[in-house]
Image (cartoon, rainbow, N blue to C red):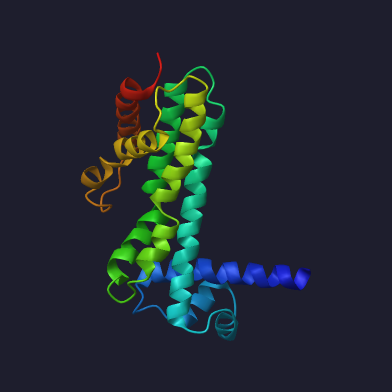
């Protein structure tokens, strides 16, 4: 058991280290030696887990996308028991999603996707597999439960989820200049508040 656990831990360290190095230097300039150093393992250990640099890159991107998905689904947890003030809970969820969408790791994931997609067209499918469609599905499930409880007026939770995410994330591209400008917390809070105000008028039962 300890041997298996150690192998899993080393693999995770390699993937985390690889993503950090690829984000810092780009694929072409990143070296396996740099990844080994960042991960705190020997270079042969990297090759024991990943056959080559291209495979390492694909797995690092997949792991980063999976982590981003897990964080976003976790951000929806308050909707399982939103309390009496549903708009306030939705606003908290929206703000958390905005913070996640603008954090340095997610921006690095997007940047690597855009810069390397011509060399690795398959990474678009890798990232989309764990992308916003999955978040929308998880959100739709929570909104469906709220509708059944009489708190949302919708027979189409998928549409409601899609519109909520559009209202929350839509302004970011222009405001952040496609991820090149860091938004202040107050600006993120303002986006979250405006999104929920609009969503509430369409969907929330008064």
In the picture, the quarter occupied by the N terminus is bottom right
Q: Is residue 106 above or below residue 185?
A: below
Q: In this view, does 81 lie above or below 35?
A: above
Residue 80 x/y as whole percent: 55, 31
The residue at 58%/73% (across/down) is 40
User: Can you name the residue that lies furthest to the right here?
Assistant: 1
Judged left or right of residue 72, residue 124 is left
Q: Residue 170: percent from the left, percent from the top?
A: 27, 41
Residue drawn at 43 percent across, 29 percent down: 90
Residue drawn where x is 23% and y is 42% of the image: 175
In this view, 100 is above or below 81: below
Where, by quadrant of the figure, is residue 42 drawn?
bottom right
**Does residue 137 appear left or right of residue 45 in this picture?**
left
Q: Residue furthest bottom?
A: 44
Quarter in which the C terminus is drawn:
top left
- Across and down, in percent, residue 7 comes to 67, 73
The structure residue drawn at horizontal position 54% and vertical position 21%, both measured from the top left corner, is: 83
- Pick whichever, 160 or 21, lies toward us: 160
Q: How many labels does the image show?
A: 0
Counting from the top left corner in percent of width and height, residue 153 is at 40, 22
Residue, far top:
206
Q: In which quarter of the image is residue 99?
A: top left
Viewer-proximal residue, 127 or 133?
133
């Amino acid at each position: 058991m300890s041997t298996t656990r150690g192998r899993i831990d080393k693999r995770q360290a390699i993937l985390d280290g690889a993503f950090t190095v690829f984000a810092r230097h780009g694929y072409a300039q990143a070296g396996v030696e740099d990844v080994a150093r960042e991960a705190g393992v020997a270079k042969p250990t990297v090759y024991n887990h990943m056959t080559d640099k291209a495979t390492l890159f694909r797995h690092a991107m997949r792991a980063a996308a999976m982590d981003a998905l897990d964080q976003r689904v976790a951000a929806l947890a308050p909707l399982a028991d939103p309390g009496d003030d549903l708009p306030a809970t939705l606003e908290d969820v929206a703000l958390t999603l905005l913070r996640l969408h603008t954090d340095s790791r997610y921006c690095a994931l997007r940047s690597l996707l855009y810069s390397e997609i011509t060399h690795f067209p398959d990474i678009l499918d890798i990232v989309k597999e764990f992308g916003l469609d999955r978040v929308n599905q998880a959100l739709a499930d929570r909104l469906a439960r709220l509708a059944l409880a009489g708190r949302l007026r919708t027979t189409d939770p998928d549409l409601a989820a899609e519109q909520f995410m559009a209202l929350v994330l839509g302004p970011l591209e222009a405001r952040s200049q496609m991820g090149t400008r860091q938004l202040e917390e107050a600006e993120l809070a303002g986006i979250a508040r405006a999104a929920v105000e609009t969503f509430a008028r369409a969907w929330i039962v008064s």
